[in-house]
Image (spheres, coloured by chain):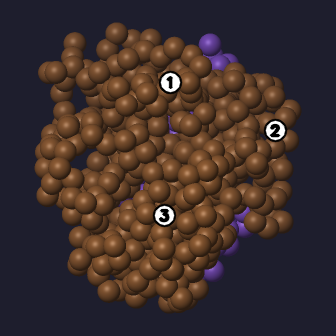
Amino acid sequence: MGKAWKFGHDIDTDIILPARYLNKSTPEHLAAHCMEDAGTLFAQDVKAEDVMVGGKNFGCGSSREHAPIAIKACGIKVVIAESFARIFYRNSLNIGLPILECAEAVAGISQGDEVEVDLATGIIQNRTTNMKYQANSFPPFMQDLIRAGGLIPYIEGRNKNA
Amino acid sequence: MSMTISEKILAQHAGLDSVVPGQLITAKLDLVLGNDITAPVGIKEFAKFGAKKVFDRKKVALVPDHFAPNKDLLSAEQCKFMRDFAREQQIEHYFEVGQMGIEHCLLPEQGLTLPGDLIIGADSHTCTYGAVGAFATGVGSTDFAAGLATGEAWFRVPESMKFIFHGTRFQKWVGGKDLILYLIGKLGVDGARYRAMEFAGEGIAALSMDNRFTICNMAIEAGAKNGIIAPDDKTFAYLEGRARRSYPLHYSDLDAHYLEIQEFDVSEIPLQVSAPHSPENAKSVQEASGIKIDQVVIGSCTNGRLEDLRIAADLLRGKKVHPEIRCLVFPGTQTIMRDAMREGIIDTLIEAGVAVSTPTCGPCLGGHMGILAKGERAVSTTNRNFVGRMGHVESEVYLAGPAVAAASAIKGQIAHPEEVS
């Protein structure tokens, strides 16, 4: 269980990880500047198991994988959004950052709520309001990617089985 | 089975007779692109594969353009890391500073992006190459790494949307940038999310290749997977002398299925600006007229081509940049720079008080060469005006085409070109 960090619609990758920090790509460096321009103390106060919540088109803009790497390195357990921009969606699956689409959960979760997520079932529970939500399920191929922990372990596993 | 141009390209590269939207495919790649920001992350991932060599050293392009020429020590290390990899792997299309340009201006110019190609690039504006009839899409560093190792990528076949621009009577000064900002204003930044955007009609046919690159470049700003324009005589003329391999020609079937078809009359589209902090905040330049600015940027993978510079020079000829404005011009490639010099464009710009830079992405993403201070405002021909995109979190960017940018540089405020010509 962790605390919810709630953000709005169209959260772009420049907000998630400002370009001025792209001159280095270690996860610790990126985590230290995650959401820095969003006007919150997110990077300072975030704790492992916390969840990030966004509106529609989360992660739009630049293809920088630094954005999901930063979120993952902060300890965020899962990003829940109404919808994801496509490159961010791919990147998250590829690097093993869990993401879930669930408009009802986004509407029902407020900043600071205690949220518990079962990644295997996609069930999201808001312990603060005692509400329960079911996230959309992924197509089978993407479930395989997620189970493998990302694209590279997935391809390696496929090659081994071939 | 009838298909769109995007579906045909994907089917061919997947070795299938046909594909349908929603289908997941694995397809062979004609080109895999990375830059000094995204490639280093990808190269480290590539090292995790068993593969020692890239799938084909002739089908990889590496361009140091974002924080290059090296903007600081850390950037120098990233550029060096990519350069060392390029040398070790004998990457044919590595472009060193002096040869390099902004990647999406450079690769088409070099004939590396051809009709019918399937291209992934670890840069969201890879969709630019749809202007020559390629299926090109932006990916992250891990997809780039997998592409380097395997020469393949997975795709979900996108639903296609068609945008038909009727007529050829453009309002004066209106170009590709205005069409695409106008369209993004109608669609919103996720209006084409996961979709293929196909641009067609007499209006598109009338546009030059430079304008078509501008349009396809910004498909991502509507959330699209790719933007594409079917090849025509202008495409073939552009490719003449550039293409060094043969290419297949694909066209959408007349009865191909589109999720949506939207039609516009080009004569009704006025010069556009997109207000902070989203490309979807498009409006006519008159609606933003008079807003005080501090900087003008003309360049980028969106509008750093010869015609863009020519438009700027035509407006700035015999005039001066407003004394309170910094006007920065970034030609997209060395060839564009040289052509602009030969045409007298660079001379005209310098005479007017413009600072002309070697090619780089520079200030577009707040990298270097023109960062905005707190409270400053710019008019820029680039593609994004997100919070903090060009510098301080409290700075602002108005997106526009080169004519509005040049006119605004002269006036010191957002201006219509008629106000200065």
Can you give x and y, in whole percent of width and height, for residue B393 in the image? 53, 81
| Residue B116 quadrant | top left
Vertical placement of A129 versus B199: above or below? below
Q: Give the letter of the purple chain.
A: A
SS for dot 3: helix
Q: Chain for mark 3?
A: B
| Residue A107 quadrant | bottom left
- Classify 10 Å Cα crowding around label 1: few (below 14), some (14-19), many (20 and above): few
Of B396 and B74, which appears nearest the observer? B396
Of tags 1 and 3, the one toward the viewer is: 3
Q: Amino acid at mark 3?
A: Ala
Of B50 and B19, which appears nearest the observer? B19
Figure colour of chain B: brown
Question: Along the horizontal axis of the image, is B70 left or right of A14?
Answer: right
Q: Are marks 1 and 3 in contact (CB under 8 Å)?
A: no
Name the residue beneath numbered marker 1: B240
Which sits earlier in the primary sequence, circle 2 or circle 1?
2
Q: Residue at x 61, y 70 (%)?
A: B350
Name the residue beneath numbered marker 3: B313
Which sits earlier in the primary sequence, circle 1 or circle 3?
1
Q: Chain for mark 2?
A: B
State the CA–CA distance, disc 3 to disc 2: 40 Å
Q: Amino acid at mark 2?
A: Phe
SS for dot 2: helix
Looking at the rendered image, the quarter that the C terminus of chain B falls into is bottom left
Looking at the rendered image, the quarter that the N terminus of chain B falls into is top left
Q: Residue at x 40, y 88 (%)?
A: B292
Q: Residue at x 23, y 70 (%)?
A: B284
Name the residue beneath numbered marker 2: B85
